[in-house]
Every structure is written in structure tokens, then in C-alpha cells.
Amino acid sequence: MSGKIMVNLLPTILYSCMLGMTFFALLETFKRPRKRQSIFLLGLFILLLIHIAGELFIYSGAYVYAPSLAGIQLPLRVLLGPAFYFYAHATMSPDKALGKHIWMVALSGPVVVLVAMLPFLLMMSPEAKLALANPATRDPDLWGIAVFTCLFSTAIFIVFTFAFLAKTLKLHSTHQKQLLERYAEVEQRSVAWIRPVIAIWGVAWLLYATEFSLGAIGWYWAGSGIVLPLLETIALAFFIQKSLSQKILNGSEKGLPLNRPARTALLSAEKMEGIAAKLQQVMTEEKAYLLENLSLNKLSALTRVSENHISETLSQYLGTNFFHFVNDYRIEEAKKALLNKDKLVISIAYEVGFNSKSTFNTAFKKRVGQNPAAYRRSHL
């Protein structure tokens, strides 16, 4: 085989780094206990490894040695979005299994792409595929088949990826809602990093699809081969760090929201008024909000009122949720303590029941309109 091998240096280096990062993340996940969360994360890393290897295969010029392997990753690439959703489902959903229809929808993507690729796979010899890389040697008819294959597989990839990213976003919103109904501290349970990952990967995969499609018809822009690999590297590094440090949530941390949007009140107004009085009493007289890791379950035990009745009273009668109800009391206590200039802000945060300074600062600013330090300066 003759001819000069074209190597795109920067993307080759970056995708090589990504390959190494993903491989070591895969090994780390493989060593963990076989929980659903770890199993689906393992599957996602395997798919990412295949996707990255496919990109490296092209950018490094290795395709000239095995042109028949070009594009074989395209059907599996469609599974990236579903695999991310499956991992998020195992991490946040109280359901222990995915429905059969979800599996069927997810697996239909690779099947559709594979069927569309059959002419490309069966009608071209390795030599003909290699000739497509050079405008001077490519066969126009075979080139048309290759372009159709690229554009069609990319369209399926975009549809499946964004459909499952949207499902992941909805799942996280439900998870966040039920946490606010049950806990006063949600930072370690909220899996908040999922949202920036969805945003970054959404942009990266949209850019990938755009570049892949334009490249198939010979169009390029100034950032081709530069912006996308950099963005994918950042997204991958962020995801690996966050996913490997994500703890496995227990059953109560993955419950369903207690109050549905269209739910009507089951308790009478008089009953909710009595429960509200009990809640306010245990907060003002016993200062239950100072308890570390106060939860709806603990408040239920203190008041001898069921969790569902407390949640309904907070939502339907007081117009709030457990998280804001408890932390409003904590913030009022903190406002008094901040008038003592000898106390550190972080010490006050822990004294009034918060477990972290960041949660305290966020909740305080949302409630008061300024952060604790600014509030202290304006009142001393």
C-alpha cells in the first residue's frame, strides 16, 4: 500500500488521552461491587471507549491499514444517549428495572443504522473504501452511498441522543423534587452534576454530528478537528471525575415525589392547620431545625404525624416543601448569629444545622438576597 498517511496531530493526541482516561475509568469501575449503578456505568464506559477508538482510528490515519473497519462503530455510537440514561436511571430512580419498551427503543437505533449501512459494508471492497478518502480516486456512486450512510447514521444518532438526554433531564428533575420534600440537606444526594454533563455533552455531540455530516460532503470550518476534540476531552474528564465519586444512593433517597402537580388535598383544612401548628411548635420551641441531617422521617417521628400528612400540609397549606421549611428557620437563626462579629460564618452555618458552607451560602442568598458575609457587613 503506498501513499502518504495523513495524521491530524492535535485530535490524535487528544483522542489518545481520552482513550487512556476511559480505559483507566473502566478498570476502576470494574473493581467495584456489582451494583446496578456500577454495571451501567461500566457499559457506558465501554461504549465511550468504542466511540473514541473509532475517532482515533480515522484521525491517526490508521484506517489505511484496515479500511474495512472504518465506520463499524457507527451503530454502537447510537447507544451513547440511551446508555447515559440507563446509568442515570440506576443512580436516581426508585425503579429497580427498566421497562422492556425502553430496551426495545434503545436497541432499535443500532439496528436501523446497521440496516442502512449494509450497502456500505457489503458493496465495497477495502480498496474501494480507501479510495473514497481521495477525491481523485473515489468512485462517484460508491461515494454517494458513503455520504448517505454518514448522514443517515448521524441523523439517527442525534434523534436518539437528544431524546434520551431529555429523559435524563426529566428524571433528574423528579429526583430533585422528591429530595426537597424529604431532606433539608440535598447536596450529597442531588446528583447535581448530571445537568452540566447533559449540557456539555449535548453541545459536544451536536457539534460532532454537524462536523461528521459536513465532513462527509467535504465541508470544513476553521475549528474542525480542534474545537470538538477539546470539548469532548473536557466533557469526558468532568464525567469520569463526577461519576466515579458519585455515591450509591439508598432507597429513601431515590423515592417518588410525595406531592404530584395535579394532586388534590386529601386532608381537610382544619386537619392541615393542626399539623402546621405542630410543625411550627417543634421548630420554635424544640428547635428541631438544629438537628444534624434532619429529614422528613425524623420530623415525622418528632411530631408523630405521618410523612405524607406533613408533606401535604407543607405543600397544600403552607405553600412550601420540607427543604425550604427547615432551612428558613435555620437562616433566621443564622441572621441573629451573624450579628456577633466574633463568630466565623462557617461556624454559624454548622451551628444552625447546615452541613456545608456552600449549601448555607446558596440558601441564605436565595432567602435574604445577599450572602452571609454581605449581610453581616450591612448590619454591623
Image (cartoon, rainbow, N blue to C red):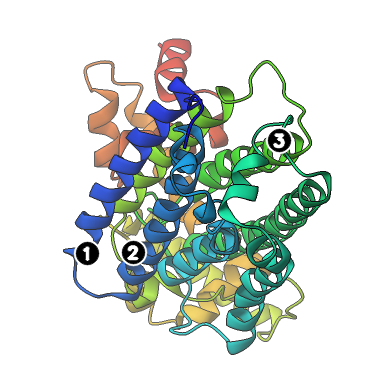
Distance from Cα at disc 1 to Cα at disc 2: 7 Å
Q: Quadrant of residue 162?
A: bottom right
Q: Using residue 291 as the reference point, say whether residue 86 is left or right of it.
A: right
Q: Quadrant of residue 345?
A: top left
Q: Give the mark, 3 or 2, whose residue is nearer the N terminus.
A: 2
Q: Earlier in the sequence, mark 1 or mark 2?
A: 1
Labelled pair 1, 2 in contact (Cβ < 8 Å): yes
Between the residue at mark 3 and the residue at mark 1, the CA separation in whole angstroms equals 46 Å
Q: What residue does disc 3 label? A: 137
Q: Is residue 56 left or right of residue 30?
A: right
Q: Residue at x 49, y 24 (%)?
A: 4
Instruction: Residue at 53% x, 41% y: name it.
Output: 196
Nearer-the-camera pick, 360 or 235: 235
In the rendered structure, which amino acid carries the disc numbered 3? Thr
Q: Secondary structure at mark 3?
A: loop
Q: Quadrant of the C terminus?
A: top left
Mark 2 element type? helix
Residue 321 location (% of width, % of height): 56, 61
Rendered view: 341 above or below 19: above
Q: Is residue 160 visible?
A: yes
Horizontal and vertical percent position of residue 29: 25, 60
The reply to whether dot 3 and dot 1 touch (C-beta < 8 Å) is no
The answer to whether the residues at label 3 and label 2 have Cβ atoms under 8 Å apart is: no
Provide residue 130's location: percent of width, then percent of height.
Answer: 59, 43
Q: Is residue 347 above or below residue 251?
A: above
Which is more N-terminal, label 1 or label 3?
Answer: 1
Is residue 352 visible to us here?
A: no
Q: Which residue is mark 2?
A: 42
Q: Residue beneath label 1, please? A: 30
Q: Position of residue 228 (x, y in %)?
A: 57, 30
Q: Amino acid at mark 2?
A: Leu
